[in-house]
Amino acid sequence: MIEATDFRNAMSLLTTAVNVITTSGETGMHGFTASAVCSVTDTPPMLLVCMNQSSRSHAHFVENKVLAVNVLSTQHEQLSNAFASSKFSSEDRFKLGDWSTMETGSPILKDALASFDCEIQDIQQVGTHSVFMCRVLKVQQSDQEESLVYFNRAYHQVGQLEHV
């Protein structure tokens, strides 16, 4: 049997994009920082998003059945930390960015690298997490070229290389 600590240490070496996942409904706007996001298929366009069931906003995502995946660029490190921290209220988190909406009403970060506006079609409970299977309804992309990624428990910047 693999120890949980060994698994987490090995997973910290898997470079991932940093995303802020948002939802909005009768109880207001909610969000969290996530790296466990991936594409499933392009026909129909589907994403998979994993969320810890102990998160204070978990019930809002389940109830609203909609979410947006906002892919962060290099200038969003402070925003990522705010959405990852329990010290910020939901209201205070959304003061940090410039937000709009698309089809579902979930908050879209205007200067995100890309935003995927989704409806949650299925939820699977796997261990401590919920796996949301999300149908992408709309996509918004920016012209920015530098992404914020997470590797070995730290933020890093990746972007277009300059040729010398």
Image: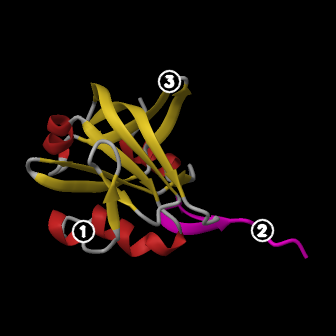
SS class of the residue under badge 3? loop
Please identify the dominant SS of the magenta region. strand
What amino acid does circle 1 point to? Arg
Q: Closer to the camera: disc 3 or disc 2?
A: 3
What amino acid does circle 3 point to? Pro
Label 1 crowd (10 A; few <14 / some 14-19 / many >=20): many
- Residue 89 in sight in this render: no
- Dot 3 or dot 1: first in sequence order is 3
- The residue that appears at 46% across and 66% down in the rendered structure is 111
Q: Are marks 3 and 1 in contact (CB under 8 Å)?
A: no
- The residue that appears at 44% across and 72% down in the rendered structure is 77
Is 150 in the magenta?
Answer: yes
Going by the image, does 84 lie left or right of 19?
left
* Percent position of residue 19, x then y: 43, 55
What amino acid does circle 2 point to? Leu
Q: Are marks 3 and 2 in contact (CB under 8 Å)?
A: no
- Residue 27 in sight in this render: yes
For disc 2, the marked residue is 161
- The residue that appears at 50% across and 53% down in the rendered structure is 12
- The residue that appears at 50% across and 24% down in the rendered structure is 44
For disc 1, the marked residue is 93
Q: Determine the residue located farthest toward the right in the rendered image.
A: 164
- Dot 3 or dot 2: first in sequence order is 3
- Mark 1 → mark 2, Cα distance in angstroms: 32 Å
State the extent of the magenta-drawn residues as a range: 146-164
* Percent position of residue 124, x then y: 29, 25
Is 157 in the magenta?
Answer: yes
Q: Which mark is residue 44?
A: 3
